[in-house]
Amino acid sequence: MARSSSVVKASLRKQSRQLRARRSPKQFQRATTFSLPGVKGFFAAAEHPQQQENAAAPAPGYTSASDGTLAVHAGEKLRKNGMADTDSIATPIVSGTTHWFKSSDDLIAFKEGRRHSFEYGRYGNPTVSVLEEKINALERAEATLVTSSGMNAIVATLLALVPPGGHVVTTTDCYCEARAFIRERLSKMGIRSTFVDLNDIEALKAVLDQGDVTLFYTDSPTNPHLKCIDIKLVADLCHRKGTLVCIDSTLASPINQKPLTLGADIVVHSATKYIAGHHDVIAGCISGSETLIKTIRAWHQDLGGAISPDAAYMIIRGLKTMALRVETQNRTSLRMARLLENHPKIEHVYYPALKRSPWHQIAKSQMTGFGGVVSFEVASDLHGVMRFIDALEMPFIATSLGGCESLVQQPAVMSFWGKSDEEKGKNGIKDNLVRFSFGIEKFEDLRDDILQALEKI
Ligand SMILES: Cc1ncc(COP(=O)(O)O)c(C=O)c1O
């Protein structure tokens, strides 16, 4: 099964060239003039000005409809390969694990790609396919694969794209479990890894100059410090050296950031967060070119990372309101971040929309909103911050983010409890750090709750 390093590298280089060609202005012109019969007028009228910036490479088969519209209709009314032969407005949950064929000729037509259908649930499912089309449209991708979790999406991507002998470069700030997988597990498979500081472009250039880097992988924004990387710049540097770029865009959501339009080759999400949006389903997704997703899909089938059709349906339902939810979360977070940065009991606020943030200019250039997570350091110690958290009445003390309900956590007590000061220091985790994931509750209610809890310190 393992392909030699040089074969994979050659195919990845070809892939990079194809991707660059796909994004030429001429191609873009052609893509934007495509229209679906009968819906052009409606979707042209529905265009959202905020999305103009992000509409660099519309998914094939779609007009330049807004994200809010695509989230509702892509894969359903605007179907490419999704659910066929139904006039139900709600996408049916196709629970069958296997699909039957009318005759051997019918089966052969399917095998030869002359008839679109499904064979076995681990390889694909009509309900999951609708969800894949929706995310595909939102990410302006050629292809999307939905997986059983965000971690499954990350692991499948790394295993599929980095062969033994390959080299992964990532940042010291990327999602901690992905970092652990890269450091501890990939090394046992003969894959080298290098960790660079997200802000240190010179260090990244120096590693790329070694000429053997297969994949660069990072989150943007990061968790919990909301640091951002210049995706366009990094993609350009990486592509010059034949290195693929994968961005975990979970904290942005597909509404606020579209890494593929900025030059990334792959975008992954923990769909558990903003995409599903209700703290009730675990899932992941990977979007990119047909060629790369086909390679990852083959590994995904071996790994058995299929999501259940019931979970896919819940995400489809959640996705329909994603634009509304995220716009509310963006607004609430921005207002709270501005209020907190001027509050006498707050030492520091991490939110890239703030002008004081070192990542403000980068974030402004590549995001259309800044998301629902705001982190801040309270002017108190571990126990004082615990009192603040316990005095909050509305948010749940819980990990995760991106859902309707606001969640709050103190990383020193949640993910870093029992860890050494050195480990916390390495990760920039102070005892007084709070991570808030704003939900869709009314801003004034959240504000009043936070202000009364700060009084309790
Ligand atoms: C940025 C980021 N990526 C990936 C993951 C993993 O996602 P999941 O929990 O859906 O496996 C998480 C989970 O918190 C995350 O925050």
Image: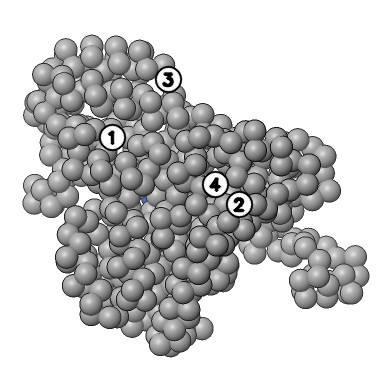
Q: Residues within 10 Å of mark 1 (few under 14, many from 20)?
A: many
Amino acid type indicated by mark 4:
Leu
> How far across and down, in percent of the image, does residue 62 sit?
65, 49
Give how far apart the Cα atoms at labels 4 and 3 are.
25 Å
Note whether ligand 1 is within 8 Å of mark 1: no
Note whether ligand 1 is within 8 Å of mark 4: no
Give how far apart the Cα atoms at labels 2 and 1 are.
30 Å
Give how far apart the Cα atoms at labels 1 and 4 are.
22 Å
Q: Residues within 10 Å of mark 4 (few under 14, many from 20)?
A: many
Residue hosting label 1: 353
Compared across the picture, whether 254 is left or right of 453 comes to right
Looking at the rendered image, the disc whose residue lies closer to the viewer, 2 or 1, is 2
> Which mark is first along the chain, 4 or 1?
4
Amino acid type indicated by mark 3:
Glu
- Camera-nearest residue between 364 and 280: 364
Quadrant housing the C terminus:
top left
Taking 345 as reference, is 377 above or below it? below
Q: Give the SS element for disc 2.
A: helix
Q: Residues within 10 Å of mark 2 (few under 14, many from 20)?
A: some
- Camera-nearest residue between 410 and 34: 34
Residue hosting label 2: 32
3 and 1 marks in contact (CB < 8 Å): no
> Which mark is first along the chain, 1 or 2?
2
Residue hosting label 3: 441
The quarter holding residue 330 reads top left
Taking 399 as reference, is 245 above or below it? below
Residue 138 is tagged as 4
Amino acid type indicated by mark 2:
Thr
